[in-house]
């Protein structure tokens, strides 16, 4: 595979990972797992969603090497496979919060102008 083909493959993989991450529940899971490994039961309780849903999300994250597992008896524990995933999610969250803040300021700045026209 030449350099251009490798670059295209990297973009495809990047897009695939981003599409996997484009789910609020998975982002919440990643945030919870950034604090250390958790069992399915812990995630179910913390997220307040059915165990089947948690398991489906975790299976997808595991399939794409975003999380890894460890078994202890009958319990399965999950943790983030690469700390850079957590860093990337935190960075994107900061960008999102900044955008929300700017949007809120814009709305507040525009409202008085609207009221003044009435």
Image (cartoon, rainbow, N blue to C red):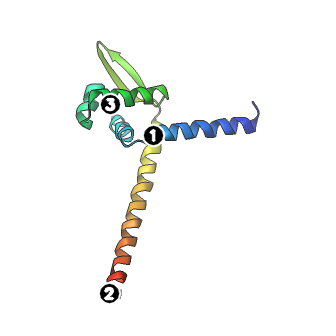
Task: Name the residue located 43 percent from the left edge and 61 percent from the top edge.
Answer: 99
Q: CA distance from mark 1 to mark 3?
A: 15 Å
| Of pointers 1 and 3, the one earlier in the residue sequence | 1
Vertical order, 52 against 13 (above or below): above
What residue does disc 1 label?
21
Q: Position of residue 64 (x, y in %)?
A: 49, 29
Q: CA distance from mark 3 to mark 2?
A: 50 Å
Q: Can residue 67 be seen by looking at this rendering? A: no
Vertical order, 96 against 34 (above or below): below
Per the rendering, the mark at residue 62 is none
How many other residues sit within 10 Å of disc 1, few (<14), some (14-19) or many (≥20)? some
| Of pointers 3 and 2, the one earlier in the residue sequence | 3
Task: Name the residue located 44 percent from the left edge and 30 percent from the top edge.
Answer: 61
What residue does disc 3 label?
53
Q: CA distance from mark 2 to mark 1?
A: 45 Å
- Locate the C terminus and report the quarter of the image it occupies: bottom left
Query: Pointer 2 and pointer 1: residues touching (CB < 8 Å)?
Result: no
Taking the image as shown, residue 50 lies to the left or right of residue 92, namely left
What residue does disc 2 label?
118
| Of pointers 2 and 1, the one earlier in the residue sequence | 1
Q: Nearer the viewer, residue 5 or 95?
A: 5
Vertical order, 74 against 49 (above or below): above
How many other residues sit within 10 Å of disc 2, few (<14), some (14-19) or many (≥20)? few
């Amino acid at each position: 595979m030449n350099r251009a083909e490798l670059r295209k493959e990297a973009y495809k993989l990047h897009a695939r990972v981003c599409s996997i991450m484009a789910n609020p529940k998975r982002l919440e899971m990643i945030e919870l797992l950034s604090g250390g490994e958790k069992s399915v039961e812990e995630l179910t309780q913390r997220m307040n969603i059915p165990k089947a849903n948690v398991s489906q999300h975790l299976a997808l994250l595991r399939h794409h090497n975003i999380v890894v597992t460890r078994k202890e008896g009958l319990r399965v524990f999950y943790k983030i496979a690469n700390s850079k995933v957590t860093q990337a999610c935190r960075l994107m969250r900061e960008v999102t919060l900044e955008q929300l803040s700017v949007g809120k300021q814009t709305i507040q700045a525009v409202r008085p102008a609207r009221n003044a026209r009435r």
